[in-house]
Image: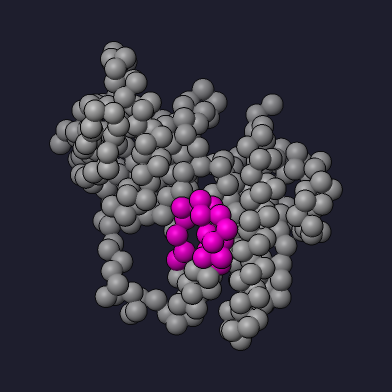
Amino acid sequence: MPLVDKSEEQEVKDLIPWIAESIDVLNEKLNLEIEIDAKEHYEKDVRLDLIGTDHMSQLVTIIEVQAGRSDHWFLGKLITYAATREAGIIIWIAHEFDDIHKHAIEWLNATCTTMKFYGVELQLAKDDEALLAPHFNVVAGPPISKYSDTTQDAAVSSLNKLYLKFFEKVRDKIFSKQPDFTHAKVLPQSWWSIGIGKPGFSLSSCFTIDDTVRVELYVDTGISEYNERVFNQLKTMKYRIEQQVRKELIWDHLPDSNAFRIYTTINATIDDEAEKSGQTADWTATMLMKFKDVFSPLVKRIKLEE
């Protein structure tokens, strides 16, 4: 293990919250929709700098920050961290990358088709007191598709445009009351998913095949034992949760997976007339805000390990 200069350690600690706040800039560079769930998060004895979810792919995402030049030891640490959390997107940020490490990232992308690895150089602009706007330079990674406005009309179906319009309306209604509600963007798909402050937990709203719109807390930590523990802990608070949400909720222990969801629904379809669609958007925005208000503090106190 190489010696780490204390000043480099401190620089990484300073960079972690700054990169989290600049995630929209990194998302634009990588064409991702990452929402940070936790900073300096511990999995057993492993500390992850940043962990979150990419809301386009729903993949667990880890971001590790290295001060200075890339090295072999940090690459090994990164892969170990990714395995610990079963991450699908791994982002390595350093000030400078050696060619051998760029090649290693390209090889990992070619070999591990279910995962995405990125090498990103961070150029720091500072004044006397603070870090200024970040400049991220992607030096290695999978092919990044540029989803430009000129191709959007051809790529997105008329149905998906309706979904996009609906969830943009929901987002706007939420932002008018809670501007910092989420960094997750709306995409042309039948659902909108956002983080709730802990890896493996998310809030979402979706149109279902049963002609309903559902608002839910979805939990999948990746470990069935943890999922069961979370479900049991929340179930002990069922009465209080439903009193706060002011709804009788459906507690769905999904039979075909280890995950579970807690949700409520309203009858609606994407083809409803404008007045009904507006009422559904109002209901969806209200329920998402209620779910976040109620579940966010509970989720943060959940203990995965006994």
- Of all residues, the one furthest to the front in this rendering is 128
Residue 98 position, x and y percent, is 17, 33
Res. 247 in view: yes
Res 208 quadrant in image: bottom right
Q: Can residue 75 be found in the magenta stretch?
A: no
The answer to which of 100 and 276 lies nearer the viewer is 276
- Of all residues, the one furthest to the right in this rendering is 239
Q: Is residue 136 left or right of residue 295?
A: left
The N terminus sits in image quarter: top left
Vertical order, 187 against 125 (above or below):
below
Tell me which segment is drawn in magenta.
170-187
Q: Is residue 305 left or right of residue 145?
A: right
Residue 157 position, x and y percent, is 42, 80
Residue 74 position, x and y percent, is 31, 27
Point 75% across, 39% down: residue: 233
Q: Can residue 178 be found in the magenta stretch?
A: yes
Point 34% across, 31% down: residue: 15
Dominant secondary structure, magenta? loop
Residue 135 position, x and y percent, is 23, 43
